């Protein structure tokens, strides 16, 4: 179990700008992020011998194009599928490659461009046919009956969640409002207009019960993370815990385990079970030891499910638990401190992981969480990372 | 590209569509446990390499959740907004999605609903639909 934990570190991070640039090349975003991460790590591109890419063509660039275009010569390459979810998995793959001796310095790169294509579910989006995928789309789509676009699965999961626990749907405002406040302190956030509770309530209904401000703004950009053996970098952030994506009949991408969505059972994970997961065991810590969180938030209900599935609170309690600023800067457990996908930019979770690295280095400026030593990335997909800075 | 929405139909799913064309709801069942399941598989998800048989079940169940499309994503359905999609439990632990023509007049959640296969213009295949007495197909 200790094979991976603590042996590797994130030694550099970098990003492009995140504004929509319909006339730009996704390779320009990729290059900006790659070069920023190399500079951050103090590395020359010739020192890179591994490359793990997320997204890929047609929204992004495939690993071979990236290597060709930027003159990299990796001898270990990987690429995950074109959806979100796989940020931690890509970084884990890099950590495994370094631990296993297959590479020494691995560039993990997410680059994508959405401003020149329609929304998912629409006919001019390259993912149009996913709603007709055999045995259902990746977010519960069933195109021929009208169940299309990822938001519908998120809306149904949240409707079911509120019904099961008898919750007021309007309490959800706390999530987008908190992350928007964080974005106001973040120079590269794309959503920097202040949002009030009234703004949130007035935002356009998309698929009831979700509204426009429950959705992350799909856009353009790239983030790069460089993974190497721990012990090399002065500003390194060690990967002390990791846990891969979960799947199966008891999972649904936009619901906690055992909610009763799709073919899930009705049996929720107990708090004790949630706290015994591999990521905690590997890092030798528990939820109480985490100082700052990154939570997958392509839609605003998703962070609630990660908080429950990873044992920060009991099943059905997260909506009450987050109220009153608990996950805001200055609160007991700040989450998505650069604005998350809802307000910084939709970057498949890579923006949050970059922010956790910046926080653990103490370089987050006015967003800095005091004495942040240990951070966690936790996703409703079941994947997670625990990261530790020099202060841990 | 066809203007009508079309699911993938092949040997695995054809028993469902053949039954649907006759107005019947047929699901794959695990032979060993007797449990129905969804989506279709040539072997039971409950047993390693377990045998599967298709059987008709009553087209009815409990309405668990309803979402309502206020924004359209599919051109063939643009004129039919708002419409709903329901999650219906048709057998313990087996849940199907069903179209709801008029979500403003939809049955209450937790209530028992009857399902039927409609054949609207916008779909090439029969569409599992929640019965709403008095509501016309859109």
Image (spheres, rainbow, N blue to C red):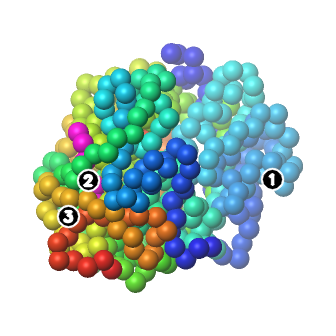
Measured as percent of width and height from the top left, residue A336 is found at 41, 52
Q: Look at discs 2 and 1 and give the one toward the viewer.
A: 2
The residue carrying mark 2 is B59
Quadrant position of residue A247: top left
User: Which residue is most to the bottom?
Assistant: B79
Q: Secondary structure at mark 1?
A: helix
Measured as percent of width and height from the top left, residue B27 is found at 36, 44
Task: Tell me how far mark 3 sits from mark 1, CA to CA.
Answer: 45 Å
- Look at the picture and state if A381 lies above or below A174: above
The residue carrying mark 3 is A170
Q: Secondary structure at mark 2?
A: loop
Which class describes the residues within 10 Å of circle 1: few (<14), some (14-19), or many (20+)?
some
**Which span is picked out in magenta?**
B86-92
Comes first in the chain, label 3 or label 1: 1
Measured as percent of width and height from the top left, residue A226 is found at 67, 40
The residue carrying mark 1 is A65
Q: Secondary structure at mark 3?
A: helix
């Amino acid at each position: 179990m200790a094979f991976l934990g603590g042996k590797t570190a994130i030694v550099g991070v970098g990003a492009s700008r995140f504004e929509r640039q319909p006339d730009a090349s996704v390779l320009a975003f990729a290059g900006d992020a790659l070069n920023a991460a190399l500079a951050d790590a103090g590395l020359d591109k010739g020192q890179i011998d591994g490359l793990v890419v997320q997204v890929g063509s047609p929204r992004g660039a495939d690993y071979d194009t990236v290597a060709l275009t930027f003159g990299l010569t990796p001898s270990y390459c990987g690429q995950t599928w074109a959806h979100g979810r796989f940020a931690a998995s890509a970084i884990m793959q890099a950590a495994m490659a370094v631990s296993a001796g297959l590479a020494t310095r691995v560039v993990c790169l997410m680059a994508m461009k959405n401003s020149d294509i329609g929304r998912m579910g629409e006919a001019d989006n390259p993912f149009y046919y996913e709603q007709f995928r055999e045995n259902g789309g990746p977010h519960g789509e069933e195109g021929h009956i009208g169940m299309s676009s990822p938001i519908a699965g998120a809306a149904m999961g949240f409707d079911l969640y509120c019904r099961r626990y008898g919750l007021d749907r309007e309490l959800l405002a706390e999530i987008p409002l908190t992350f928007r406040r964080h974005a106001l302190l973040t120079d590269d956030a794309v959503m920097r207009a202040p949002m009030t509770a009234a703004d949130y309530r007035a935002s356009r209904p998309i698929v009831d019960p979700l509204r426009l401000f429950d959705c992350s703004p799909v856009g353009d950009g790239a983030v790069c993370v460089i993974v190497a053996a721990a012990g090399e970098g002065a500003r390194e952030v060690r990967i002390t815990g990791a846990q891969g994506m979960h799947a199966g009949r008891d999972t649904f991408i936009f619901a906690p385990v055992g909610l009763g969505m799709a073919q899930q059972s009705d049996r929720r994970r107990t708090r004790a079970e949630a706290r015994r997961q591999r990521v905690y065991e590997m890092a030798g810590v528990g939820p109480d030891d985490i100082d700052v969180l990154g939570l997958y938030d392509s839609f605003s209900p998703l962070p609630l499910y990660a908080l429950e599935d990873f044992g920060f609170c009991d099943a059905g309690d997260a909506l009450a638990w987050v109220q009153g600023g608990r996950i805001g800067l200055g609160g007991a457990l700040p989450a998505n401190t650069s604005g998350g996908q809802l307000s910084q930019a939709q970057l498949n979770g890579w923006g949050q992981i970059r922010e956790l690295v910046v926080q653990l280095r103490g370089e987050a400026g006015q967003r800095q969480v005091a004495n942040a030593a240990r951070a966690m990335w936790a996703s409703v997909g079941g994947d997670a990372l625990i990261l530790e800075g020099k202060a841990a | 590209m066809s203007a009508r929405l079309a699911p993938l139909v092949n040997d695995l799913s054809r028993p469902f569509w053949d039954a649907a064309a006759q107005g019947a709801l047929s699901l794959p069942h695990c032979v060993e446990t007797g449990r129905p399941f969804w989506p279709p598989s040539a072997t039971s998800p409950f047993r390693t390499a377990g045998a599967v048989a298709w059987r008709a079940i009553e087209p009815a169940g409990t309405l668990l959740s309803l979402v309502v499309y206020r924004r359209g994503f599919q051109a063939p359905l643009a004129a039919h907004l708002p419409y709903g999609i329901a999650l219906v439990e048709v057998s313990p632990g087996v849940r199907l999605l069903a179209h709801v023509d008029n979500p403003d007049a939809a049955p209450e959640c937790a209530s028992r609903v009857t399902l039927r296969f409609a054949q609207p213009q916008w779909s090439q295949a029969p569409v599992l639909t929640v019965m709403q007495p008095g509501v016309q197909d859109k």
